[in-house]
Image (cartoon, helix red, strand yellow):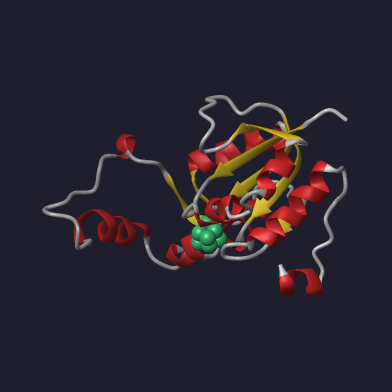
Amino acid sequence: MSKKKLATVWLGGCSGCHMSLLDIDERLLELLKLVDIVKSPIVDTKEFPGVDVALVEGAITSDEHLHEIHNIRKKTKILVAFGDCAVTANVPSLRNPIPMKDVLSRAYIEAESVDKGQIPCDDAILKLLPRVMPLHEAVKVDVFIPGCPPSADLIFYVLSELVNGRIPVLDKERLRYG
Ligand code: SF4
């Protein structure tokens, strides 16, 4: 059986889901017999290649994320919403009820770490969308892995099923015990 191609992507998230992926520990070696990781935050590929499976962490917060997720969808057979930010928009969507000018002011002017800050000009920062979205509002999602972050056991189960050509069953029992 030829090796599957796997990508892991980080959009509007905190990287905690990727940390949980690394918590698979030595079982990663089992997976690497069946997959090649061709794109991830630790594989410096500029272009998104065609892949069998893409794990996408984080919500869609900016025009750049929106462009990226459409590009990923075009080049991916099985797209996985990886963690609660990707599944529901979760923490990044806490800004949704707040006017954009107040969001930018809090980050660039009022934050405790800022000394005489100013809001950067439009060209200097990502163009934030008016509303943070989960992945499925922008593209078709094939598999959802909930959790903030999902447990390493759950991630390992999902990846094991996918690289063996099966769609994982995430029923109540599985989600309760990871
Ligand atoms: S789901 Fe939780 S751990 Fe994963 S990116 Fe979002 S906040 Fe971080």
Residue 21, horizontal then vertical, whole percent: 60, 52
Residue 90: % across, % down = 54, 65
Specify the quadrant that holds the N terminus: top right
Using the rendered image of the protein, determine whether residue 145 is visible from the camera's viewpoint. no
Which residue is at a point 67% across and 45% down the rendered structure image? 28
Residue depicted at x 43% and y 64%: 95
Q: Which quadrant is home to the C terminus?
A: bottom right
- Displayed quadrant of residue 151: bottom right
Residue drawn at x 28%, y 57% is 107
Q: Where, by quadrant of the figure, is residue 85 drawn?
A: bottom right
Depth check, front residue: 22 or 55: 22
> Is 86 positioned to the left or the right of 93 in the image?
right
Whole-percent x and y of residue 70? Answer: 64, 38
Q: Residue at position x 44%, y 68% from top?
A: 97
Q: Would residue 63 be found to the left or right of residue 117 on screen?
A: right
- Given residues 150 and 119, the one toward you in this image is 150
Query: Which residue sits furthest left?
Result: 116
